[in-house]
Image (cartoon, helix red, strand yellow):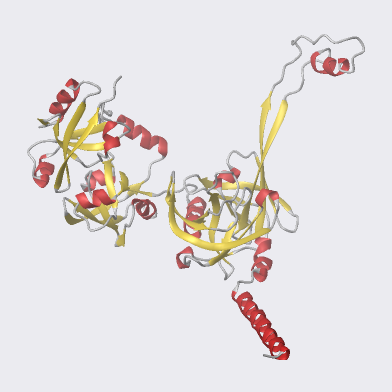
Amino acid sequence: MSYGFLSRLSSLVLIGILLSGSALAKELPDFTSLVAENGPAVVNISTKQSTSIPRRLRDLPMPKLPDGSPLEEFFRHFFGEDGPLPEDDIQGRSLGSGFFISADGDVLTNAHVVEGADEIIVRTSDRREFIAKVIGSDKRSDIALLKVEATNIPKVHIGSSKDLEVGEWVLAIGSPFGFESSATAGIVSAKGRSLPSENYVPFIQTDVAINPGNSGGPLFNLKGEVVGVNSQIYSRTGGFMGLSFAIPIEVAMDVVEQLKTKGRVSRGWLGVLIQDVTRELAESFGMPQPRGALIAKVLPNSPAAAAGLQVGDVILSYNGREIPTSSSLPPLVGATHVGESAKLVVLRQGKQIELTIKIEELPDEDQLASNDKGSDKPSANRLGLVVRDLTADERRQLEVDGGVLIESVERGPAAAVGLAGGDVILMLDNQPVSNRADFDRILEKIEPGRAVAVLIQRGDSRMFYAFKLPKP
């Protein structure tokens, strides 16, 4: 093999590598035009919160200092004849992002960005500044609508998060750490995520680099349309670690419309506490696989109570949409207009039944707590259980003569061994349980630290569990 042949072969290989690299580069998205077109509609938001703290130091004793000490004049000013200091005006500033959704100055951002602000300053990419007022905000969705006095403002194009697919490219523009007009890109890594204490928002999960200051900024698809509002990150350090979450733009715009027209946001309410169906629970219910939302508690005076939903029911679908996990249900209920009727498919004692329920408005958190506190439900017992007597219909459906129904499970021995809401206790400490009075009497006589067996019925199956009552 001649040197000339090897040289030509090496050249061909190099050309092939360069061509394949060029082809790969062409497949990667180019965000330059997207940023240029939409950057002017994205704003930086800073806020001020003032707190007056009086400092009265005149009556404090002045420290003893050597004559001629350079600190003598300093301490005389603060402790001596100059009198009390004026009140301190401590100003806190928060930085966030937002974007114009109308040409006449409507700005969309996160509620937590402007919460408690005395003054809100909106700064555009061309260095103009506006004082904004809050039209309204909604903590449950973390959306706020601001207004600035301006006209012919560049605005974003609103898209649809429903068309997003996992793996699709998206881009964020915002002010991370105060660095205005910063663009970061990534892909959609999941949809419909539920986060703790955020039950009514099906978040878009991405790997776009989102940091403090990005909150409230827009998330764009490759068409240059806003599909979400950047809201949260998952982090153990306070900085970006590969997981960020955006509020779907449909949720945000629905909140905006309600804030404009009503000044407040109303959501649908079912009135149940739910949990996931585990593999073990699915097996006990005779389900081929875990799915749905298991009702652990029906709140009193709620739509669910009026419609006849019961503890132990598994909601399989809502208005024709399947419920794969319990976190899928709250956003669907919340998006239902108050007063509308919803159709549910429920698994009860191994049989699927259809129920129609009239959706009411979700009460505020204080009202929910007050209603729950004022109900006549008993407090949790030594096992960490709240139980009640079975109704005649429930006994007939379960084909039992007695027993008590577990309404809820709190931390305690019962939770530790896996008892769950909807289970029926038939025996306790080898004694049959006819009703709640029986249950309370038996439980009261059990000595702490002794192993106790309990027989429960879950769906069509029965099983024994054993636990020890904690010592005082």
Residue 417 at what x, y percent from top left?
Answer: 27, 37
Residue 329 at what x, y percent from top left?
Answer: 34, 53
Q: Is residue 216 in view from this perspective?
A: yes
Quadrant of the frame with the N terminus = bottom right
| Position of 393 relative to 249 (above/below) | above
Residue pushed farthest right?
A: 68
Towards the viewer: 237 or 353: 237
Quadrant of the frame with the C terminus = top left
Towards the viewer: 90 or 471: 471
The residue drawn where x is 50% and y is 59% is 249
The residue drawn where x is 41% and y is 35% is 366
Q: Is residue 449 left or right of residue 258?
A: left
Residue 464 lies in quadrant: top left
Residue 259 at what x, y percent from top left?
Answer: 50, 50
Residue 397 at what x, y percent from top left?
Answer: 11, 47
Q: Is residue 207 left or right of residue 284?
A: right
The residue drawn where x is 61% and y is 50% is 211
| Position of 456 relative to 100 (above/below) | above
Towards the viewer: 120 or 16: 16
Towards the viewer: 383 or 81: 383
Q: Is residue 437 left or right of residue 330?
A: left
| Position of 266 relative to 164 (above/below) | above
Q: Is residue 271 in view from this perspective?
A: no
| Position of 332 relative to 7 (above/below) | above
The residue drawn where x is 55% and y is 56% is 229
